[in-house]
Amino acid sequence: MAELLIGQVLAYHGDPFVEGTGAARHMTRGGVLVEGGKIRATGAADDLRAAHPEARVHDYGQALISAGFVDAHVHFPQTAIIASWGKRLIDWLNSYTFPEETRFADPAYAAEIAGRYFDLALAHGTTSMCSYATIHPASVDAFFGEAQRRGLRAFAGRTCMDRNAPDGLRDTAQTAYDESRALLTKWHGVDRLSYVITPRFSPTSTPEQLSALGALWAENPSCLMQTHLSEQTDEIAWVKGLYPAARDYLDTYEMHGLLGTNGVYGHAIHLEPREKDRLREVGAALVHCPTSNTFIGSGIFDMAGLKAAGQVVGLATDTGGGSSFSMLRTMAAAYELGQLNGAALHPAQLWWLATQGSAQALRVADRIGNLAPGMEADIVVIDLASTPVIAQRAARAEDIWEAIFPTIMMGDDRAVAAVWIGGKQAVARAD
Ligand code: GUN
Ligand code: ZN
């Protein structure tokens, strides 16, 4: 049965970092026709209603209908340790993250946290995500099992580490290859799921392990490869010591077959000119994780500069180094860091990053992250007056961007009125 969602509709036909707000298409009284899990049409609500009298109508009034949010870098196993106080990256990993990830040796715990993670992500309007799991294959099975049950387009991989990690979280080059390969074979391309080859980062892998995963990627080039890059200055100094022959941090990946178009590099804050050049030449994706960068004290990602230079950039929570599950809060943090960096990112750019930008980074922008005929029907409906503070500010708005910006800056899961996954309603907030 066809479903017709009516409200304010926001879609894009270009990149607002390139084309400005003209890249966006807003309809005050628009409609999105959904059938068979896909978007069949978008247009004026009245026209769609007249053309499709058989469709079941969901009238969301003044609420904003958008593509669902795409979180391009998250650690679902860190759900329970979000907002852990007082550490910077390496201490934070050793104090909070690694002990928590050790618990995923228990498949029942992995399943419990995967369920909790997806409940939270969906409640916040995130309809696709690219996650790190832990070293335990059961953590990957738990993630994909839950994502499959919910019909999500989701990405994840087994996080590989063979040094500088505690007992119980270390593998070897060979077991990393073997277990990643087995999970890839099991899950990659099943339903809407994609396996992602996942070396955690250069400090926790030997050169042998990076090479083994580089070989696995060469054998499976349709997979994404995700890792961390140049997040904190202490980390970069450590990488220099561990890989004395490398020209820079990116080279530790490049030397081992881990630089490519389907590479997704989280953080990428303190980049050298050569690293930027190589990333752009290759067309690899960078993922900005703003709430994490402030929370762990990492630094300021140069969004405006990197986008102007033509880099592929996505946006992400990086939960639990990030301090929120909300892509609204994540957009707000990106705005705040932009201000500190001398560039006020426009709401059209922030919203694009959280939808199309992240979908581009994950190489699925032709399928998710926008509202257009043929796209998969993953949709979020956002109440632009979800709290008294937001409502009184939005009431003064003179255009759609002024109406959206208070929700970007102050909104949370209370703003999420409905979520549709693959053409089916997954979250409906009862007012
Ligand atoms: N670098 C290596 N592992 C991690 C992680 O789990 N979170 C963040 N923020 N950075 C990392
Ligand atoms: Zn991360």
Image: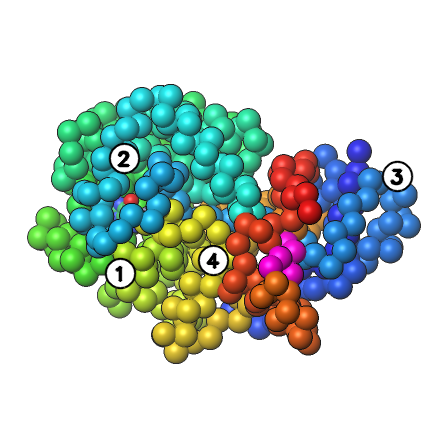
Among the two numbered marks 2 and 1 on one chain, the one whose residue lies closer to the N terminus: 2
The answer to whether one can see residue 348 in this image is no
Among the two numbered marks 1 and 4 on one chain, the one whose residue lies closer to the N terminus: 1
Q: How many marks?
A: 4
Secondary structure beneath label 1: loop
| Circle 2 Cα neighbour tier, 10 Å, few/some/many (<14 / 14–19 / ≥20) | some
Q: Position of residue 203 (x, y in %)?
A: 17, 45
Whether 55 is among the magenta residues is no
Residue in front for this viewpoint, 60 or 258: 60
Q: Position of residue 393 (x, y in %)?
A: 61, 71
Label 2 to label 4, Cα distance in Å?
25 Å
The residue that disc 3 covers is 54
Q: Name the side, left or right, on which 26 lies relative to 285.
A: right
Secondary structure beneath label 2: helix
The answer to whether one can see residue 199 in this image is yes
Q: Main secondary structure of the magenta part?
A: loop
Height in image: 225 above or below 12?
above
